[in-house]
Image (cartoon, grey):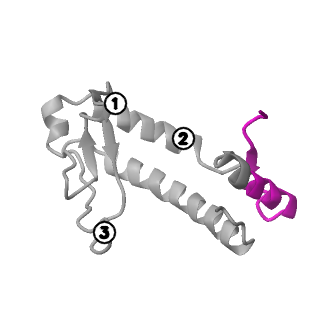
């Protein structure tokens, strides 16, 4: 077994890098993305805000608990093999009015200045990278299945 494939986002227009992406998708199903341009300061802001959120009292976090109808929000009762995990989750995504995620609306904790901005800034940056990767896969006709 080899090493996890490395794909450079900055070199994605290079046909050799596109071949690396295709091989990673076809043979591994995942890869390590480098040269993505994500800002280290932006990540530090996000991590600081997440520490503040997860440091809140349980009752504050549960005020924005995800539900069966809305998967965005806080959750702390995840199960693995019918046993409760020792983790907390904050899920976020787009507001969705139609489709399989209809009714999904991001929920935000009260009193955490900067939390929403930090989370959404990171979300948008990662979303842009995801769309760029998907566009490359589509444009170069990489067959994943």
State which tag comes first along the sequence, 1 or 2: 2
Quick one: SS at disc 1? loop
State which tag comes first along the sequence, 3 or 1: 1
The reply to whether the C-beta atoms of the residues labelled 3 and 1 are less than 8 Å apart is: no
Q: Residues within 10 Å of mark 3 (few under 14, many from 20)?
A: some
Q: Quadrant of residue 90?
A: top left
Horizontal arrangement in the rendering, residue 79 relative to residue 43 (left or right): left
**Count of all numbered marks drawn on residues in the image:** 3
- Report how far apart the C-alphas of labels 3 and 1 lie in the structure: 30 Å
The reply to whether the C-beta atoms of the residues labelled 1 and 2 are less than 8 Å apart is: no
Determine which of the numbered discs, if any, sits on residue 96 in the image: 3
> Where does residue 82 sit, x and y in percent of width and height?
28, 30
What residue is disc 1 on?
Answer: 81
> Where does residue 85 sit, x and y in percent of width and height?
32, 27
- The residue located at (19%, 45%) in the rendering is 65
- Report how far apart the C-alphas of labels 1 and 2 lie in the structure: 38 Å
Q: Quadrant of the N terminus?
A: top right
Q: Quadrant of residue 48?
A: top left
Quick one: SS at disc 3? loop
Q: Quadrant of the C terminus?
A: bottom right
Q: Residues within 10 Å of mark 1 (few under 14, many from 20)?
A: few
- The residue located at (25%, 34%) in the rendering is 76
> Where does residue 54 sit, x and y in percent of width and height?
29, 31
Residue 61: in magenta span: no
- Residue at the right extreme? 16
- Considering depth in this image, is 18 or 109 the residue closer to the camera? 18
Q: Would residue 4 be visible to someone looking at this image?
A: yes
Horizontal arrangement in the rendering, residue 98 relative to residue 135 (left or right): left
Q: Which residues are magenta?
A: 1-23
Residue 11: in magenta span: yes
Q: Residues within 10 Å of mark 2 (few under 14, many from 20)?
A: few
Horizontal arrangement in the rendering, residue 41 relative to residue 7 (left or right): left
């Amino acid at each position: 077994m080899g090493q996890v494939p490395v794909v450079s986002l900055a070199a994605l227009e290079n046909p050799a890098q596109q071949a690396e992406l295709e091989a990673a998708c076809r043979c591994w199903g995942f890869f390590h993305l480098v040269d993505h341009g994500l800002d280290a300061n932006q990540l530090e802001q996000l991590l600081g805000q997440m520490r503040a959120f997860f440091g809140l009292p349980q009752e504050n976090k549960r005020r924005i608990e995800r539900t069966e109808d809305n998967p965005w929000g806080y959750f702390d009762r995840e199960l693995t093999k019918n046993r409760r995990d020792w983790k907390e989750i904050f899920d976020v995504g787009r507001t969705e009015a139609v489709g399989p995620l209809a009714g999904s609306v991001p929920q935000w904790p009260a009193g955490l200045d900067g939390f929403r901005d930090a989370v959404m800034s990171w979300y948008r940056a990662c979303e842009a990278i995801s769309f760029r990767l998907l566009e490359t896969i589509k444009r170069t006709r990489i067959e994943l299945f």
